[in-house]
Amino acid sequence: MAQSLNLFTEAPVQGELDLALNPMTIAAQVAFDEATALIPGQAVKIVDSVDGIPKVTAVTADTDDVFGFVNYSEKDADFPAGAPCEISFFRGNVMYMTASAAIARNAKVMVVVSGSKVATRASSGICIGRALDKATANNDLIRVLIDLPGVAS
């Protein structure tokens, strides 16, 4: 979302962190074979590699083992193959994510791969956290308390 120069405060954007402390952040690198640049708020999985910092790639199904989510960066709009990035992982970070439909406050949410969004968790999906805000429609920006590793039960 483009920010207007006439705003008194900037509006939140997908992938931006919220609340005072977000200690579960780790440096990572986009896998060199990633075909499409990763965007802030996108779910990623870790790649089995032998050296350096963790390599990540986009999840391809809502049943993938999500490692974390790409953090928003004021410097970079997206993260192509080989680019460094920061990932919110495990539990505790609160991130702005885009809803794919209405979501109740405190509902368990899952990844919607198409469009890098979240939805109320279905029985087959992996739970990645809880909605801290209520979403009333598609494309609402809500805060999600990340809780990984997600489980399907």
Image (cartoon, rainbow, N blue to C red):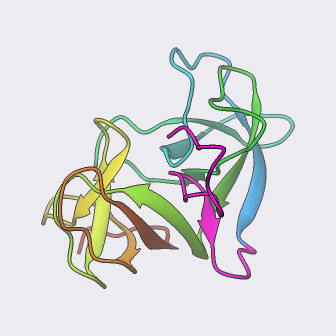
Q: Specify whether 71 is left or right of 2.
A: right
30 in the magenta segment: no
Q: Residue at x 61, y 55 (%)?
A: 7
Q: Which of the two residues, 102 or 126, is positioned nearer the viewer here?
A: 102
Task: Provide the residue span drawn in magenta.
Answer: 1-23
Quadrant assignment, res 79: top right
Q: Which of the two residues, 120 or 142, is positioned nearer the viewer here?
A: 142
Q: Point out the residue furthest to the front here.
A: 6
Q: Which of the two residues, 7 or 106, is positioned nearer the viewer here?
A: 7
Quadrant assignment, res 4: top right
Q: Residue at x 44, y 71 (%)?
A: 144
Q: Which of the two residues, 51 or 41, is positioned nearer the viewer here?
A: 41
Report how many numbered discs are placed on residues in the image. Answer: 0
Q: Residue at x 43, y 57 (%)?
A: 97
x, y (%) of residue 2? 55, 37
x, y (%) of residue 121? 21, 66
Q: Residue at x 17, y 57 (%)?
A: 101
